[in-house]
Image (cartoon, rainbow, N blue to C red):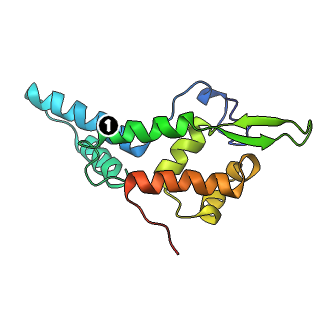
């Protein structure tokens, strides 16, 4: 993915970098903390603060015990394909969420279409309203969040 071309403005240093959701970071940090504790070592206060933040904003009540669900949700969204008509060629083409869009959706947890396109503008150019609503429904169902009415 070319972050500059796709309008993310992150620069070339992010080419080929895998994005992680807050939930994935929480699982990694918790695993690292447990490994340190088993070796009778402690982690820094900054580490603890980062872990607390990642857990709090993961979208899960118990992200460590739900780590399978975290991975399942991400895989489901990574494999979800949508069809859009290419405006230049008029042909139907398959569109997928970029890694950055996917993780942004998981971390920012927009409640509806309007909030999603406001927070992640690239979605509006690549997906229909129905597609975005379907994506949000998958996220809300998996995390137990409810939409604003």
Residue 27: where, in percent of width, then height?
A: 30, 38
| Rendering quarter of residue 85 | top right
* Number of marks present in the image shown: 1
In this rendering, the answer to whether 29 lies above or below 13 is below
Name which quarter of the figure residue 130 lies in: bottom right
x and y percent of residue 80 in the render?
58, 38
Q: Is residue 139 above or below residue 2?
A: below
Badge 1 density bin: few <14, some 14–19, many ≥20, Cα 10 Å: few
Q: Is residue 99 left or right of residue 40?
A: right
Give the image location of residue 39, x and y in percent: 10, 24
Q: Quadrant of the N terminus?
A: top right
Q: Is residue 78 visible?
A: yes
Can residue 5 be spotted in the picture?
no
Residue drawn at (62%, 40%) of the image: 97
Q: Identify the residue position indicated by label 1 in the image.
A: 68
Query: What residue do we see at 36% from left, 39% from top?
Result: 25
Query: At x 72% / y 53%, what residue is drawn?
Result: 128
- Residue ID at (60%, 30%): 14
Relative depth, front residue between 56 and 36: 56
Relative horizontal placement of residue 19, taking residue 96 as reference (left or right): left
Figure check: 15 above or below 85: above
Q: Depth check: give the residue in front, 118 or 72.
A: 72
């Amino acid at each position: 993915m070319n972050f500059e071309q796709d309008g993310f403005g992150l620069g070339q240093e992010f080419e080929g970098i895998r994005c992680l959701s807050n939930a994935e970071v929480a699982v990694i940090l918790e695993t690292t903390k447990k490994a340190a504790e088993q070796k009778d070592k402690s982690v820094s206060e900054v580490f603890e603060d980062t872990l607390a933040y990642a857990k709090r904003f993961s979208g899960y009540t118990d992200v460590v015990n739900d780590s399978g669900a975290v991975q399942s949700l991400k895989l489901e969204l990574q494999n979800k394909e949508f069809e859009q008509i290419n405006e230049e060629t008029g042909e139907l083409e398959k569109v997928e969420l970029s890694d950055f869009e996917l993780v942004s959706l998981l971390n920012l947890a927009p409640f509806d279409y309007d909030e999603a396109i406001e927070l992640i503008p690239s979605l509006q150019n690549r997906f229909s309203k129905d597609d975005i609503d379907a994506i949000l429904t998958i996220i809300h169902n998996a995390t137990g969040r409810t939409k604003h009415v």
